[in-house]
Amino acid sequence: MMDDRNALLSDQTFARAIEFIWREAELLDRRDYRAWLEMWDPNGIYVVPIDPDTTDYEATLNYAFDDQHMRELRVQRMASGYSASAADAARTVRTVSRFTRSSDSADLVEVKSSQIIIAYKRGVSTIFAADLTHKISMANGQPLLVEKVIRLINSTEALSAIGFLL
């Protein structure tokens, strides 16, 4: 009986994590970056590594390696309208799928998934594909991002205009 209860709670936690990830994608597509910031644990890390196999993000070069301060600066830049990328930002549609549970506990769930982003700007559509890893804290009853890693499938190529990936 206890195993059934634990499995049910684990399935419910996984389902909540997936809903949380879908909500994040929706906020980003709507450019609601302030609400996106509220989804983060203050100690959380957002990473877009160049090396597709790295796990030591601090010791390798990344497109992004943002703590809370850097996320806030990124959002400020994107929301200000003063930078060229913000004034003429691409419209995006994200699809996140292929969810697998890497690990979970009562307080932390790790979910791996795939993401396709279509970015439309100046009459041109660009496709970005990536494997995602979300580590989500469930400790206080409200999910919070502890870590998000975006592994672009073409990360070792020259890329431009990826600041909106978040």
Image (cartoon, rainbow, N blue to C red):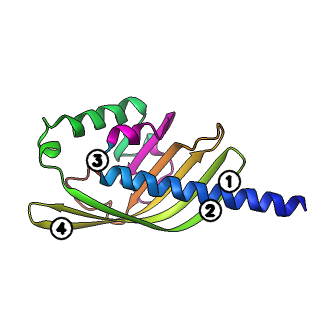
- Depth order, front residue of 126/143: 143
Q: Which of marks 3 and 2 is in front?
A: 3
Mark 1 or 3: in front is: 3
Of label 2 and label 4, which has the lower sequence position?
Answer: 2
The reply to whether discs 4 and 1 touch (Cβ–Cβ < 8 Å) is: no
- Horizontally, residue 161 falls left or right of residue 136, namely left
On screen, residue 79 above or below 126: above
Mark closer to the chain start, 3 or 2? 3
Q: Where residue 144 sits in the image (x, y, percent)?
A: 54, 41
Give the quadrant of the N terminus: bottom right
In this view, the residue in front, 82 or 155, is: 82
Amino acid type, label 1: Asp
To which residue does mark 2 refer?
Answer: 101
* Type of amino acid at the residue the image marks with label 2: Arg
Q: Earlier in the sequence, mark 4 or mark 1?
A: 1
Q: Name the residue under label 4.
A: 125
Which range of residues does the magenta coloring cover?
A: 33-57
Residue 43 is one of the magenta-drawn residues: yes
The residue indicated by pointer 3 is 31
